[in-house]
Image: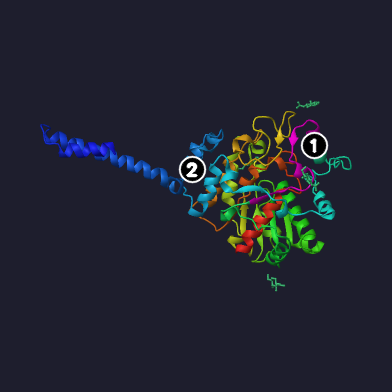
Amino acid sequence: MTSFLFLRSLLLRNNTTTWIVRVFAVLTMLTMYYSCLFSFLQTIIVPVSQSPTTLIIKDSSDLATETNHLATSTTTALPEYDLLWRVHSTPEAAAVAGRWVNRPNQALQYSAEHLQCLDLERQGNCHDPDAWKYSNDKAKQSRHRAILKQAVANSPGILNASDPWVWESDSFPYQVLPYHVEEYKQRVRRLLHNRTIYLVGDSVTRQWAQVLRCELLHILDFTQEQAERTIQRMADFCGEELREVPTTFLQNAQPQDYLIINYGHHCGRGVKGPEWSTNYTKLMSHLQDISYGLLPDTHIFVRTTEPRHFLRGAGDWNTNSSQAGGSQPNMHAKWSLYGGNSPEQPMQNKLLLRILASEKRRRNFQILDTAPLMLARADASFDGTHFCLPGPHQLWSQMLYHRIEQE
Ligand SMILES: *[C@@H]1O[C@H](CO)[C@@H](O)[C@H](O)[C@H]1NC(C)=O
Ligand SMILES: *[C@@H]1O[C@H](CO)[C@@H](O)[C@H](O)[C@H]1NC(C)=O
Ligand SMILES: *[C@@H]1O[C@H](CO)[C@@H](O)[C@H](O)[C@H]1NC(C)=O
Ligand SMILES: *[C@@H]1O[C@H](CO)[C@@H](O)[C@H](O)[C@H]1NC(C)=O
């Protein structure tokens, strides 16, 4: 404003100043105005038009150098990916995506049979402190040792199988089908009718498959045979078995079925070393070359990978110094807090978004973005990488149900 007044006084002044000086001053002033206006516009427009590649390189994460080679590739995020990109680019991502709220009456109630069903999953039982005694399972022994060392912490609801925290969001991709006893049962039975949910991924996906099956059996009154037919899971850690997905796993898939794929933990630095991103980029790209039988692309979800809840720099599953977990959900948790010795998030998920949003060869896949909400749930960690059952996996199911129902 002051410079505008100065400009005006310059034009109106009628003294000794020569015309040349006046014209020069006016031009300089206008140039300043335009460059100010331009940089202002840039700050408000950038989130939509800036290439994710540039953002990756600017990211201050210690992984930035590993993704430098991506600087030469060209890609533009499409509008529907912008929200997800923004969430993953924000340190406190859970708070941008939605919120965990303490609402015991909107959380599933677990019967004794339901809990027994969940206990069949080897990396899930946190509600029975003696679980390690009646099993030689290494996973249970390892959690027990972590507890003795006070290396893993959980919230009270997670420890007594009545987690009161439910997720809610105002943004479509992060919304969940809310749990209201009778109505919920009918809605979920209807949306799963005559469908199979195919899951491909590592042990965290295996846990989720069991959470889904147990819900079908003990909340939705499916028979054992129906539950097993409806929820099918194939183990694949980092694409080693991808070739088998269309030929074997999906050979009976029908157009109304759904596939949810996740690759992440076994494709990170801890397993693949410092060059992990080259490998991961190729795998994500390869997902787009495959035909998934009769399944339409819109029924194929790629699920993002939750952070590993070991404190960054404080050891990992194979060190004595690790620290994992928390005593309640933490909406202010940052990506940089976690990852132990394999801190690939949020970089790995951003690579996934960048590759699937690339304009070239783009397929109509959907993203099931479970990572941001899990950032806040270190308190539900079984051992740093897996989750306690019952726990927040349930909300992944409700997020998927919401998407299927909206279809
Ligand atoms: C679980 O623990 C919480 C907090 O200590 C308590 O409020 C709740 O009643 C307990 N629930 C059960 C089923 O024991
Ligand atoms: C289930 O879907 C198949 C097609 O995939 C169809 O042939 C069959 O009639 C459906 N069954 C019911 C009970 O809707
Ligand atoms: C991925 O990593 C494995 C080793 O973990 C390596 O053998 C393989 O060649 C890599 N693949 C690509 C495409 O870089
Ligand atoms: C971890 O601690 C145990 C005993 O507490 C010890 O025997 C073992 O060597 C330690 N391992 C490492 C990697 O420090």
Q: Indicate left or right for 154 with 296 as reference.
A: right
Residue interval drawn in magenta: 145-167
Can you give x and y, in whole percent of width and height, for residue 174 in the image?
A: 60, 53
Q: Name the residue under label 2.
A: 53
Q: For the residue marked with disc 1, what is the amino acid?
A: Ser
Instruction: Residue 92: name its quadrant.
Output: top right
Image vertical order of residue 374 relative to residue 3, above or below = below
Which residue is the extreme one toward the right? 134
Q: Can residue 268 be seen in this view?
A: yes
Residue 294 pos. (x, y %) = 63, 65
Badge number at residue 142: 1
Labelled pair 1, 2 in contact (Cβ < 8 Å): no
Residue type highlighted by circle 2: Thr
The answer to whether residue 202 is magenta is no
The residue under the point 64% across, 32% down is 312
Quadrant of the image where one finds ligand 1 = top right
Q: In which quarter of the image is residue 296?
A: bottom right
Residue 345 screen position, x and y as percent: 60, 40
Callout 1: SS: helix
Q: In which quarter of the image is the C terminus?
A: bottom right
Quick check: 362 left or right of 376?
left
The quadrant of the rendering that contains the N terminus is top left
Give whichever of 261, 243 is nearer the camera. Answer: 261
Query: Where 403 sits versus 83, above or below?
Result: below
Q: Which numbered mark, 1 or 2, is in the foreground of this view? A: 1
- Colour pattern: rainbow
Q: Distance between the residues labelled 1 and 2?
A: 40 Å
Q: Which of marks 1 and 2 is nearer the N terminus?
A: 2
Q: Position of residue 403 (x, y in %)?
A: 62, 59
For residue 259, say whether it is visible.
Answer: no
